[in-house]
Image (cartoon, helix red, strand yellow):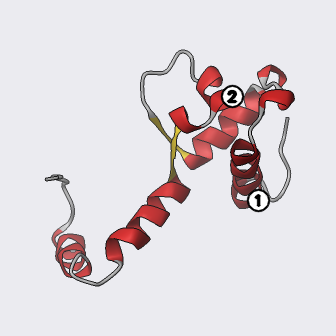
Amino acid sequence: MLCQVKLSPTVSVRLRHALMLPGFEARLGRFLDEEVIDVREYPELTLLCWNRRDRFLPAREALALYERNWRFVDGARLTDRERALIDALTRRYGNGTLNA
């Protein structure tokens, strides 16, 4: 798929060379998984995003949304995957503490 992005000339050249490296796309995918959350993959987060149109959310913003709205999160409905996401976000952005 063609994806056009506006980058500085230096970053553009580096990206063009990086794309030729074996395994680069997989590493880029892992980076995106850490930085950008697909709301549709997490049921409770989907409910918290009831008033948002975007499918993707910056990871730091996802944690802030969980923290601000924790009273609406049904712990019994959290999947193992969503719990793991919250734990990872809490470790990365919350210094290990969920401010709920």
Q: Name the residue rendered at 83%, 45% in the picture.
A: 98
Left or right: residue 6 versus residue 88 is: left
- Badge 2 marks a residue whose secondary structure is helix
In space, the residues marked 2 and 1 are separated at their CA atoms by 19 Å
Q: Name the residue rendered at 18%, 52% in the picture.
A: 3
Q: Quadrant of residue 12?
A: bottom left
Q: Quadrant of residue 88?
A: bottom right
- Find the residue positioned furthest to the top: 51
Question: Is mark 2 in CB contact (under 8 Å) with mark 1?
Answer: no
Q: Is residue 98 above or below residue 44?
A: below
Amino acid at dot 2: Glu
Closer to us: 96 or 47: 47
Per the image, the residue denoted by label 1 is 91
Q: Residue 58: horizontal and vertical position, in percent? A: 51, 45
Per the image, the residue denoted by label 2 is 44
- Could you tell which of marks 2 and 1 lies nearer the N-terminus? 2
Left or right: residue 7 versus residue 87 is: left
Q: Bin the neighbour count of mark 1 within 10 Å (Cα to Cα): few under 14, some 14-19, many 20 and up.
A: few
Residue 24, disc? none
Q: Residue 79: horizontal and vertical position, in percent? A: 74, 39
Q: Name the residue rendered at 20%, 66% in the picture.
A: 8
Q: Name the residue rendered at 78%, 20% in the picture.
A: 72
Count of numbered labels shown in the rendering = 2
